Image: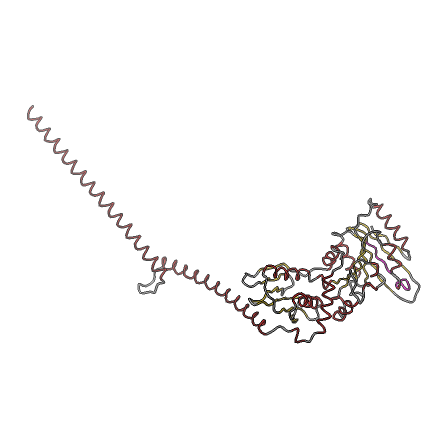
Amino acid sequence: MIIDLTDTTSSEIASALLRARRNAGSPAMGMVGTIVVVVDEASHHDAMKAANEAGREHPSRVLVAILRPGRGSGGLDAEVRVGEGIPGEAVLLRLHGELAKVPESVITPLLLPDSPVIVWWPGGGPKVPHEDPLGALGRRRVTDAAAGRRAAVDFPARAEGYAPGDTDFAWSRLTPWRALMAAALDQYPTKVSGAEVVSAKGNASADLMAAWLQCRLGVPVEQRNSRGPGITAVRMFTPAGPIALTRPDGAVATFSIPGQPDRPVALKRRNTSELLSEELRRLDPDDVYAQTLACLVERDKMPESAKIVSEADRRSVQSAAEKAASRTASVAGKAASAELEAHAADASRKKPGPKNAAKSPAAKKASAAAKSARKAVAAKKASATKSTATRSTATKGAATKKAAAKKGTSKRVAGRS
């Protein structure tokens, strides 16, 4: 159900929501919170779609605020959506003129009571989110540094004005990367002497990843550029070789640990609705994000020499790559050699070559065994034939003697008669 309201008020919008719920047969509200989306006219459709998809896991009231400041008199146009595949409620608000300068006066009456509020800026967000009029309403404030034009400048400003509840999608995109690298050190506890992050140029998540590694490991972390997409590799250098997570295609990564076979890992780039769902799962302050922001500021003040991996670590990567290539070639060579040897043995049995042709030891052994087997079979056949002939001769002799004895007896009987 879609209800269009022109030149309206917050009270009329709330009444329209109540009527829409009653007409849909669900007067009770089963929503867990309110998502306030601050966006421009050009990208409001994608933002509302992402919020509604996230609402399938967390049913919420979505308030999309499009601010159109100007000198004219203030005005408010609204579009109320209930049902039609929407898990909760969605309200599209267009604030004109002077009213766009005080959007909190329109949003506050529409917030669900006694439920958390999440404020999201898909287009980047303010430098200090909690000081924004709408950001002050939120328990969780979500920005996206990747959407801003000056992402490298925003992080120091946000670190200085950080407040509990602030977060960024550039940090949310690192969740699977951080989990896998931490799990690697749990499975393979060792000393890490350096690390590197390889990504597309100007990637905000790569800056946070490098700061997080340097903060947690206390080692130099070098950043290198690639063609992307996004982060393509993260490596931690150890005495036995690098612990590496490489993802050149943005979908499947290869997880490498020294002394263990490489493992493929599903690590696709997540869309906006998945990132928003992750932020809705936890509404408590993200202390690790706050610490990483502080580490990022300290890292920016470091000299470049403190952010370069040593040549020994770089050689360990080359050595590990050469060993992996050698193992692959060795395995492939052994398999090919065994296959060729079996093929040659089959060919020699089916089409024997010249007597003076060179044979492998395995082929010679197989030929000798076959020859011995043939001799044994021939000897058995000869023995059986000889035995049969002997029995036949003995039988014939006995039959001749019996016939002669019978003939003599017949003559004696005839003489007496």
Q: Nearer the viewer, residue 74 or 347?
A: 74
Going by the image, does 318 lie left or right of 392?
Answer: right
Q: Is residue 88 magenta?
A: no
Q: Quadrant of the C terminus?
A: top left
| 103 or 392, nearer to the observer | 103
Residue at image x 31%, y 63%? 355
Q: Residue furthest top?
A: 417
Q: How is the image coloured?
A: secondary structure
Residue 359: x and y, percent?
35, 63
Task: Please name the residue shown 16% across and 36% down the image.
Answer: 398
Q: Residue at x 76, y 71 (%)?
A: 153
Q: Is residue 288 above or below residue 150?
A: above
The image quadrant of residue 78 is: bottom right
Residue that sits furthest to the right in the current view: 73
Residue 412 is situated, as x and y percent measured from the top left of the image, at 8, 27
Give the percent coordinates (x, y) of residue 245.
61, 64
Compared to residue 385, the image places residue 93 above or below, namely below
Q: Is residue 56 left or right of residue 353?
A: right
Furthest residue to the left? 415
The foreground one among 198 and 10 is: 198
Query: What secondary structure predominates along the stretch shown in magenta?
Result: strand
Where in the figure is residue 320, as x and y percent of width and height? 55, 68
User: In the image, is residue 96 part of the stretch drawn in magenta?
Assistant: yes
**Left or right: 109 as drawn, with respect to 220:** right
- Figure disc tally: 0
What span is colored magenta in the figure? 90-100
